[in-house]
Image (cartoon, grey):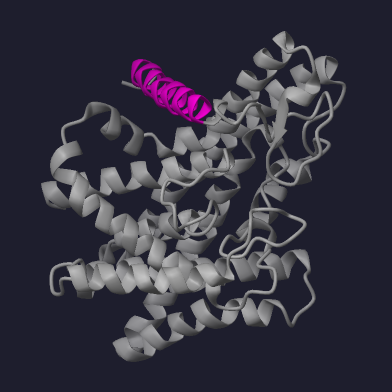
Amino acid sequence: MDKIFSGEMTLLKALAILLVVSGHLEFSIFGMFPPYSFQLALFFFISGMLFKDKYLDDVYTYFKRRIKSLLLPYFGYEIVYLLITLALVPVVGEFLGDTPSLKTFFITPFLNGHQLLLCAPLWFVPQLFMTMIAFLFLLRIFRRINNEKITLIFFLILGFFTIPVWKMIPHTTLALVVMRTAFSLFFVYIGYYYVKHIKDKHDIFTPKWFGAIIFFQSFLWLFNRDFDPYHGIGLSYVLVWGRFDEQLIVPVFTSLTGIWVSLFAVKILYPYLKDVKLIQDIGNSTYHIMANHLFVMYLITTVLFHFADSPLMLKITGSHVFTRGDKIYSIFDPVQMTYLYFVVVVLVTTYFAKFQKFIYKKIFP
């Protein structure tokens, strides 16, 4: 991996996690792209970009590396947040998540990952693990066929027909897992295909491309609605629960245009940000920011709530109804607090991640 590509990937990962955090605070870094309209697809795309063909002949090593990099930290966080959640029961008067059991600890993470609300964004990690393992075996199969067009057509079918099929079948737990995996596989392959066949061979970041993407996204905006769970979410979608409202292919298109804009932004900003240490730290700490940012939001809200005169001074985010004990998806109003939340959450989670890595190296030199 050359130095420039590595640096751009770090910046792209930093942008992706900032999009996740901003989404949970209900504001958009890119104005034409509402929260939840493409950031998870971007993470899958990045995973495809980083996939190495050498693992096609070394499945054991790939399994071992993915378990070590994804699942072991995941269950470590599950233990920590289980203890935190249990400790909070006497304070908030309820368990913030599903009742603890062997099923919720070992099985639920692979079904929806919301067994512990304080670290609910980590649902993405088991899904990424399942997606990448499926991707490995699919590439092994298509390598035997040795026809790139057939491979591309297969993944295009996954991308553009998963949502229509999902709307036609019973929404069981197993069907939800299969749907998410199929949808995610498309973006993993697009990232893989981009590195293999586009990145160094075709310039897709010209002014004409920029104009075409902006025009197309402005057309897609016709399908957008205010981010309101009662009126639908338009360009946004909630992959974890398979919620696409009445949309069939718009989520795929807005994900692709969002990925292009992200790559374009990185191309422009990289010369100016490549030596900014904070950006590098954010890009290298995405796992820990994903795990901890909602908890930091919760702590900020709890502190501010303690000093507030009225619970009406809390702004509800997402579709959760506010009660005194359920502030997981709530932020302090007025709306001017949003960006302060964003800055504080990013800084705290990033530097806490650096502290975690420092301690880990001391324990396991």
Q: Is residue 64 above or below residue 355?
A: below
From the image, give the main secondary structure of the stretch colored magenta: helix
Q: How many circles with numbers are drawn on the protein?
A: 0
Can the viewer see residue 135 in this picture? no
The picture places residue 178, in percent across and down from the top left corner, at 63, 70
**Furthest-top residue in view?**
307
Q: In screen coordinates, is 45 left or right of 199?
A: right
Q: Is residue 135 magenta?
A: no
Magenta stretch bounds? 339-362
Above or below, 340 against 67 in this view is above
Position in image of residue 263 (x %, y %): 28, 57
Q: Is residue 96 above or below residue 205?
A: above
For residue 52, what is the image quadrant? bottom left
115 and 160: which is toward the camera: 160
Q: Quadrant of residue 322?
A: top right
Left or right: where 121 falls relative to 252: right
Q: What residue is at 44 percent from the left and 80 percent from the top?
A: 155
Toward the viewer: 204 or 139? 204
* The stretch drawn in magenta includes residue 361: yes
Check the picture and name the quadrant holding the C terminus.
top left
Q: Position of residue 115 (x, y in %)?
A: 73, 41
Q: Report the side of 40 relative to 334 (left or right).
A: left
Vertical relation: 357 (above or below) 4: above
Q: Quadrant of residue 54?
A: bottom left
Q: Which residue appears at 63% of the width and 26% of the height?
A: 334
Q: Residue at x 66, y 13 (%)?
A: 303
Residue 213 shows in the view: yes
The x and y percentages for residue 21 are: 50, 39
| Residue toward you, 336 or 190 | 336
